Amino acid sequence: MDKENKKEESQFNGVMFNAYPDSIGNKLSDTLDMFQLPEFKDTFSLFYVLPTFFNSDLDRGFSIIDYNLNDELVSNDDLVALEKLGICLKFDIVLNHLSVASPQFKHLLKHGETSKYKDFFINWNKFWQGYGNKNDDGIIIPDEEYLNKLFMRKSGLPLLKVVFPDGSEQPYWNTFYQKTTYNPIAKQDLDNIKQLTSQQANSICQLVNNSIAKSENLDALDLGEFNSYKPAVIKILKQKRSYLGQMDVNAKSELVWDFYNETLAKLKSFGCKILRLDAFAYLHKEVGQSNFFNTPGTWNHLDRIKKIADKNGLILLPEIHAEYGANLHDEVAERGFQIYDFFLPGLMIHTIEKKSSTALLKWAQEIIDKSYSVVNMLGCHDGIPVLDLKGKAINGIYNKGLLEDSDIDFIMETVIGRGGKVKNLYGPNGKKISYYQVNATFFSALGEDSKKMLLARAIQLFMPGIPQIWYLDIFEGKNNYEAVEKAGEGGHKEINRTTLTISEIKEGLKKETVLKQLELIRLRNIHNAFRGDMSIQQSKPSEIDILWENGEDFANLKVDLNLLTYDINYSNFS
């Protein structure tokens, strides 16, 4: 990393708050009111505000419609207030996809092959033409040699079929979420069906709408005496259906890069300083590769987006979940990027529950030795990563993980036993190939033990890197099973996204462990020692001894894992 970027990065070395715009109260201004409470004085220098800050429609913000302010939650006055508080912003750009409700995809649906955005997204069949064969549904199934290499985030092929104006169904690449909804029909929708009486039309509508209400498979739709009209009715249903989905963009299109240029400039105008690259590892697509962190294509895309970021004075933080043994974190860091410390949450649980600091401190020493620039966390809007801790074979050589598989299994069993929900990865055949993460609040993952939560926070704040703090963890939030049930299929993430009212915040601030967390955060945020160097002092496996020094300023953490206690000594702080 060049000297200018290092200098800029050092300006953002405080503690980072992490929440949605409406995680506290009803909108962003309620979070700003919380920041101005005396208990929050000097606690945060940065705010990672999640993407419902912008206009979006699902996955709690990660399906972007456009990058304009979501005026239901955010106002320009909020941006002014954050600047006055001296809090810098971190945003997401979701590089890999946009919502089906984005202006670009809506234009494609309206104009089909004549749309200026016809190449902005990836037509699955065009991509795989010549590398597979069509099935009965008109979808090209890639040849086995290509299909078996694909990295899948969900079961089944990653595509969504949409209807073009000419009535044809076109499959578009869709790595993440999708949903197709068949909408009820009315008598006038059937006006173009010849020789159909008004009474017959009413009867068909009743049969169809009853089937839709029962979520029945429309291929098995039985119209009884009106079955001769079924093909025409199905065609109408398909034309009227609506979609939700995160549609993969085509990085080979210059229009996509024009969009990135416009978006980064806009985010800069909102006060963005750090930009998280969400799902960037899926952006590059190529036949014969896994289409997850393809090389060298992904690096080429990163270099290009970095040039745009540099032009706008933005620090990039690529988000990537991969096995430690894949060494991708090391490659990303070597190219001058900040990296996410997705290893810390699992290591922290292992350290506290096993009462052994060996694995945790080995990772901390690697960060120091290799001069990684990291952002770390305990809880976050997503799950507790477990895949990241694993080893992986590269070119026939097995690279060890940060933990043995048995230790990772222990973490999973512990968190699941305390109510966590598992998220898996899938192969092309729809079968599970690996676990991915466990969704839970970090407090519940620790057995809802306030002593463990406070100890975990103390250790996190003395680890190298920028500490990112999930709002719910400060207030010892518990697993929200009601929210999971209400969200339905795929709603596991809601277990850790409970909205807190201002009255709940004020009540939480009466708890000693909450106030102690905020005291620790304040120390980490403003003490000069943390702008210096960190060293790990020799200690027993059941102990931790970390020292930060900057000139005459110091801060020292000593932990006894057997007793679950810590002691902090520091200089010149009030």
Image: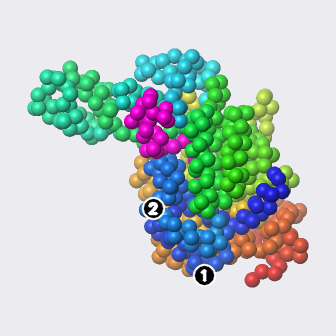
Q: Nearer the viewer, residue 326 or 65?
A: 65
Q: Nearer the viewer, residue 358 or 182?
A: 182
Q: Amino acid at mark 2?
A: Asp
Above or below 384: residue 196: above
- The circle drawn on residue 71 is 2
Instruction: Check residue 275 for magenta coloring.
Output: no
* Foreground disc of the pair 2, 1: 2
Secondary structure category for the residue under label 2: loop
Residue at mark 1: 38
Identify which residue is drawn at 78% across, 49% down. Answer: 336
On screen, residue 487 versus residue 539, left or right, reads left
Please provide percent x and percent y for residue 309: 68, 51
Where does the magenta region start and end?
A: 91-118
Choose top left, top right, bottom left or bottom right for residue 169.
Answer: top left
Choose top left, top right, bottom left or bottom right for residue 152.
Answer: top right
Above or below 514: residue 132: above
Please provide percent x and percent y for residue 179: 42, 39
Identify which residue is drawn at 74% across, 55% down. Answer: 374
Identify which residue is drawn at 59% across, 56% down. Answer: 267
Number of on-image labels: 2
Alpha carbon distance from label 2 to label 1: 28 Å
Please provide percent x and percent y for residue 26: 45, 67
Q: Nearer the viewer, residue 101 or 40?
A: 101
On screen, residue 571 versus residue 223, left or right, reads right
Please provide percent x and percent y for residue 266: 58, 55
Above or below 434: residue 571: below
Instruction: Check residue 93 for magenta coloring.
Output: yes
Q: Earlier in the sequence, mark 2 or mark 1?
A: 1
Q: Amino acid at mark 1?
A: Pro
